[in-house]
Image (spheres, rainbow, N blue to C red):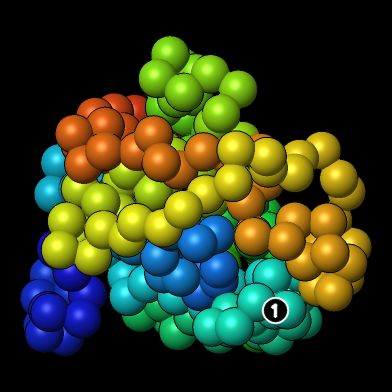
């Protein structure tokens, strides 16, 4: 059940049965010469819809732009500062808590969002307490990084080994190929790809990772692999969501 395709009366009825909601969050950033700029948001959104269908959960509109400042030396990347993303998440959640939601399951597609999301949750808890919103003490937020799921990690290692890398990975590219087969990109990739460097500024990042990849070989991705990753993620995160909403 997608929030943006529902009426307010349908949301009100849903809240009588459940106070849980799935929030997809990704990023709009470069993913190497063949990866779509919207990869992280596409993966988070599609998997969230699948989890929503499997669990009959409400799914919020996707937060498409995340914390990707280190990618901004590449054209097309759009990023929020951590402080801005914290405010965005806090405002999202405050409105939804006022409506009656208390359980927020963030399905995340971008590693760069993790630290900021955790800070945003802490800011939100304090903000809701200050506002003395009813049920604010019951509000709980959880991050589920689809790409870190045990079944996903295992399959990526089986299919790609060390060529999975850590950015513009064949696993995430494969999911986008499954969702948007008409948008599959091909371009020559150097067999030499940088990896292992720490992340600092955007300019430094591009100098260390000149084509945007981090130890990955997205040429190995296929739509068929993407369906496998999608199915595994939906199954694993559906269980995670149901366990979460049952917690006291």
242 horizontally vs 107: left or right: left
Q: Is residue 84 above or below residue 169?
A: below
Q: Residue at x 51, y 38 (%)?
A: 217
Q: Which residue is mark 1?
A: 72
- Image: 105 above or below 14: above
Q: Is residue 158 above or below residue 244?
A: above
Q: Is residue 165 left or right of residue 7?
A: right
Q: Position of residue 165 (x, y in %)?
A: 61, 35
Whether residue 195 appears in this view of the structure is yes
User: Residue drawn at (83%, 56%), measured in percent from left and top?
Assistant: 208
| Figure quadrant of residue 45 | bottom left
- Where residue 204 appears, as percent x and y from the top left, is 88, 67
- Residue at position x 32%, y 43% in the image: 174
Q: Nearer the viewer, residue 221 or 99?
A: 221
Q: Position of residue 155 (x, y in %)?
A: 39, 19
Q: Is residue 134 visible?
A: no
Q: Nearer the viewer, residue 242 or 152?
A: 152
The local secondary structure at tag 1 comes to loop
Mark 1 Cα shell of 10 Å, populated few (<14), some (14-19), many (≥20): some
Left or right of 120? Residue 216 is left
Q: Nearer the viewer, residue 207 or 239?
A: 207
Query: Residue 195: x percent and y percent?
Result: 76, 40
Occupied quadrant, residue 225: top left
Left or right, 91 with reference to 170: right
Q: Quarter of the image for the N terminus: give it.
A: bottom left
Q: Please determine whether, in this image, residue 210 is positioned above or below residue 52.
A: below
Residue at point 55%, 68% (across, down): 30
Question: How many badges with numbers are in the image?
Answer: 1
């Amino acid at each position: 059940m997608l929030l943006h395709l529902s009426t307010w009366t349908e949301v009100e009825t849903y809240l009588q049965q459940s106070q849980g909601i799935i929030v997809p969050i990704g990023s709009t950033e470069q993913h190497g010469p063949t990866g779509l700029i919207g990869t992280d948001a596409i993966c988070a959104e599609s998997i969230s819809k699948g989890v929503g269908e499997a669990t009959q959960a409400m799914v919020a509109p996707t937060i498409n732009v995340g914390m990707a400042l280190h990618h901004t030396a590449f054209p097309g990347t759009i990023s929020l500062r951590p402080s801005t993303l914290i405010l965005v998440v806090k405002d999202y959640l405050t409105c939804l808590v006022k409506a009656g939601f208390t359980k927020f399951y963030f399905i995340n597609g971008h590693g760069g969002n993790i630290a900021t999301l955790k800070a945003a949750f802490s800011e939100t808890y304090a903000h809701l307490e200050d506002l003395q919103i009813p049920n604010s003490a019951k509000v709980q937020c959880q991050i589920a990084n689809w790409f870190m799921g045990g079944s996903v990690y295992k399959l990526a290692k089986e299919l790609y080994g060390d060529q999975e890398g850590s950015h513009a990975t064949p696993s995430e590219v494969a999911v986008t190929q499954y969702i948007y087969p008409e948008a599959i990109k091909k371009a020559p990739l150097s067999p030499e790809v940088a990896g292992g460097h720490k992340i600092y500024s955007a300019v430094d990042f591009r100098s260390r990772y000149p084509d945007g990849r981090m130890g990955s070989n997205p040429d190995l991705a296929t739509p068929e692999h993407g369906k496998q990753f999608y199915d595994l993620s939906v199954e694993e995160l559906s269980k995670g969501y149901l366990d979460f909403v049952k917690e006291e």
